[in-house]
Amino acid sequence: MYSSQAPIRTHRSFHDDATFQELMGERLKQSPWLLLSAGLHAVLLLLIWTLVPPEAPKKAVTSVTMTNTDKQKIVEPPPPPPPQPKPEDEPDVVPVEDVNVVDREAEVPSEDNSQETETMSAFDSKYWNTALGLLGGAAGPYSGRGPCGKKGGRSPQPNVGPGLQWLAAHQDEDGRWDCDGFMKHDNPSYKTCNGAGNAVHDIGVTGLALLAFLGENNTMRQGQYRENVRRGVLWLRAQQEPVSGLFGSRASNDFVYDHAIAAYAMCEAYGLSGYKTLRKSAQLGINYLESHRNPYSVWRYQPRDNDNDISVTGWAIMAYKSAKYFNLMVNDDAMKCAGVFLDQVSDVSGAHGYKRAGESCSRKKGEHAVKFPAGKSQALTAVGLFSRIFLGQDPREKPIMGAAARLLNATPPVWDEKSGSIDHYYWYYATYALFQMGGTPWVKWQRALERAVGPHQHSDMSDKNNYGSWDPVGAWGEDGGRVYSTAILTLTMQANYRYTRLLR
C-alpha cells in the first residue's frame, strides 16, 4: 500500500499535448554539444563556398569517340554493290542429226565462274588485262548498227537485205556455211548456183557470214535471223580444239586466216548476244592467236616462226579489239607490237607493204598474178589504215594515215573482170577505213563503191537461187567462192553503221 502523503512523479507520454518545439528544446538543453557541432559545420560550409569558384556553365560540344587504333581500324563502308543481273535465259539448243553439236552449258544457266578461271588465259603474264579498249561514244563502237535486226525494219543499205537472205537460204542445218557445197540448198526448179570455193575455208566463210548477220543487229537473242546466228555460233564452237582453242584444223597452209575470222565472229557473238556460255570459246580463240603470234612481233601462217605479214595481222587485230571491248583477256603488248610492225612496213607515201615496206599485194604464182595484177589493188594500204584507226592512232599525229587515204582514193573500186580490178577483200578494208576517216575521202569512195558493187548483185527475183548474191570473180573468189563474195560484200555495204566513228 502506498501512503497518501508520498509524492508521485509523472512523465508525459507520446500522446501528451507537448509541442515538437518543446521536446526539441528540452533535448537541446540536455545536449549542448549538438549546437556546437552544427555551428562548426555551418562555418566550414561557408568557407568552402567562399574559397571554391562556382562551376562555369557547360557549353554544347560535339561528342567524339576515340578508338584505340592498335586494337581496331576504322574502315569506310564499301559502296553499295551493283544491282545483280537477272538470271539469263540461255538459248535453246536442239541437237542436229549426224552432227555432234550439243550445248549442255546453255541448257542450265550458271553464275559460277570457277570453270572459266582455268581457261581465261593460256599464259601466265602480267600484261593480260580486261580493260575496255575501243573509243567512241558512251555506247561504244557498236551503238550505230543497222535497225534490221533490232527493230525488224529495213536496212539503210538496199543491198544488205538480199545478201543476208541469200546467206540464210544457203546455210546447212548444223550451222555451217559450206564453201564448196552450198548449192545443195538450191531450189531444183531453177538454175543452180555456181562459184564453189575451197572446202578448207568453211571455218572462215562461216565466220564472215556470222559477222554480216551480227552487223545488222541479229544476235542469238534478237533479230529476223536469230536462229541462223545461233546455229552458226554453235557449229563454230563445235569445231574448236578444246585445249589450244584453234577453230578448225591445220589442213591448209593459211589456216590462221580462217581461225582469226572465226575468233573475231565468236567474240562479237559473245558480246552482243550476252551469253556467258560463249565466253570460254571466245577466250580460247584469242588464246590461240596469242600462242601463234611471233615473239615481240605479229602474225603470219605458221605459229611463232618469226615470219610476219600485214594481212593476217589485220584480222588478228580486229579479233583482239573486239575481245577487249567485250571484257575478255587480251595482251596489250600484242597491240603495241602491231603498231611497231605497221610503221616498219610503210613509208611516207602512205603505202603499206605485205611483209616489208615497198612490197605489193600478195598474189599466187602463175595465172592468178596475171589475171589480178597487184597494181590494181591497194589492199595492204587499206588493211594498214584500218588497223591504225582501231589501234587508236590519230591522223593529226600520224600524217601517214592521211597519205594512205589519198592512195586508196586514187585506186577506187571498179568492177571490170577483164582488167582484173575486182578485189572484194581490198574494197572491204578500204570502205571501213575511209568511213572512219570521213570527209571528202569517204564521200568519193562511197560513190565509187555504190557504182561498182550495187549493180552487180543478183537482183532478178526469177533467178531465185542466185538472188541476193555476188559472183566470186574477184582476186580471192576461187578460194572462198560465192559464200565468201556475198558475205564480205554484205559486210562492206554495212560500213557506214557497223561501227560508230572512232575518230573525232
Image (tube, helix red, strand yellow):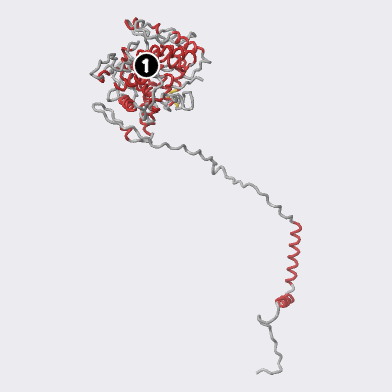
Which quadrant, please, contains the N terminus?
A: bottom right
Q: Residues within 10 Å of mark 1 (few under 14, many from 20)?
A: many
Q: Is residue 439 left or right of residue 45?
A: left
Quarter of the image where one finds residue 249: top left
Q: What percent of the width, then of the height, locates residue 4?
A: 69, 95
Give me the residue at 53% from left, 15% from top.
396
Q: What percent of the width, then of the height, locates residue 166?
A: 31, 20
The answer to whether residue 239 of the structure is visible from this angle is yes
Q: What percent of the width, then of the height, locates residue 479?
A: 31, 13
Quarter of the image where one finds residue 113: top left
Q: Is residue 69 left or right of residue 177?
A: right
Viewer-closest of 283 and 425: 425
Viewer-closest of 457 and 485: 457
Would you name the residue on which mark 1 appears? 489
Quarter of the image where one finds residue 34: bottom right
Considering only vertical position in the picture, is 436 above or below 367? below
Mark 1 residue type: Leu
Give me the residue at 43% from left, 37% from top.
84
Considering only vertical position in the picture, is 25 above or below 390? below
- Total numbered labels: 1
SS class, disc 1: helix
Viewer-closest of 118 and 456: 456
Q: What percent of the width, then of the height, locates residue 332?
A: 45, 22
Q: Is residue 10 left or right of residue 252?
A: right
Q: Is residue 484 left or right of residue 394?
A: left
The answer to whether residue 242 of the structure is visible from this angle is no
